[in-house]
Image (cartoon, rainbow, N blue to C red):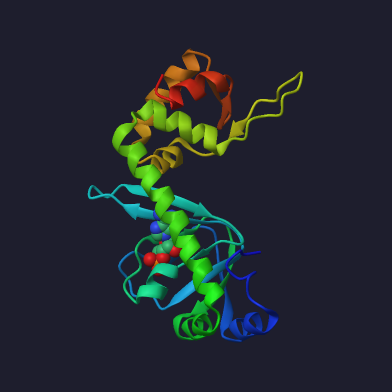
Amino acid sequence: KSFIFDALDDQARQELANFSYVKRYAAGDKIFTMGEPGQSMMAIAEGTVRVTMFTPSDREVTLNDLQAGDVFGEIAMLDGQERSANVKALTNCTLVVLERRALLDVLQRNPILSVRLIELLCQRVRRSDERMIEIAFLDLPARLAKLLLRLTVAPPASEEKPLAKLSQSQSELASMIGNTRENVNRCLRKWQKAELINLQDGWLIIRDRDRLEALAHGE
Ligand code: CMP
């Protein structure tokens, strides 16, 4: 399922498989803690994991959610230093663990695998740069509007236009944009009054995508 490994031929893939093993985690389990030593990289076979960091005031900020086919742990695996972030299981997860020694061996003989890992790191740098700019230069409403739009796909243009719904809690949304639950709650209540969204039975329902788009662009 992973673009990292689909470049390998069967023999190299078999070689990697011989040195890998499967590890299962239950929803909520810690997988990595930032600062601990790391000697392996994980590929997600099933489930979702969340990558986070703690702010100096101990608030947990989400960097990314990763799904089946994604890999993580490549940073400590490649540079031999500490884990750069925390990773926890959001759902029950099945992971394939690849140890540094075996992986470096296969990397040396399969340069395409190195290229794919470099591409992965490039994607992550691009995304981190975008986020840094958003956090530094966009206000909370713009960041929150961007997030809601990113988490929901625009409904197909049809007569009834089904409304997009989100199940994330307000704390989770706050963690994804590096802000507090209280501020997010205040902003969502304002938007509910203005009929941009509805907060109903634990769901957040998008009512006016166009106005959210305008807010996301700082209008
Ligand atoms: P590593 O540092 O070994 O352990 C933590 C992992 O979290 C890291 O490797 C990456 O795989 C992953 N990670 C760190 N920062 C990000 C990010 N901004 N986006 C996605 N994944 C990340």
Give the x, y percent position of residue 154: 63, 30
> Where ligand 1 lies, by quadrant?
bottom left
Q: Going 75% across and 19% down the picture, which residue do you hit? A: 160
In the shown orientation, is residue 130 left or right of residue 13? left
179 shown above or below 11? above
**What residue occupies the far top of the structure in this picture?**
194
Q: Going 48% across and 13% down the picture, which residue do you hit? A: 194
193 shown above or below 206? above
100 shown above or below 84? below
Give the x, y percent position of residue 53: 34, 54
Q: Going 55% across and 20% down the picture, which residue do you hit? A: 210
In the shown orientation, is residue 135 left or right of residue 104? left
Nearer-the-camera pick, 15 or 98: 15
**What residue occupies the far left of the structure in this picture?**
56
Q: Is residue 51 visible?
A: no
Give the x, y percent position of residue 76: 38, 72
Quarter holding residue 139:
top left
**What residue occupies the far right of the structure in this picture?**
159
Give the x, y percent position of residue 87: 43, 61
Q: Going 42% across and 18% down the picture, which residue do you hit? A: 190
Nearer-the-camera pick, 106 or 184: 106
Q: Quadrant of the N terminus?
A: bottom right
Q: Is residue 163 visible?
A: yes
Q: Quadrant of the C terminus?
A: top left
Quarter holding residue 86:
bottom left
In the shown orientation, is residue 180 left or right of residue 40? left
In the shown orientation, is residue 158 left or right of residue 173? right
Quarter holding residue 12:
bottom right
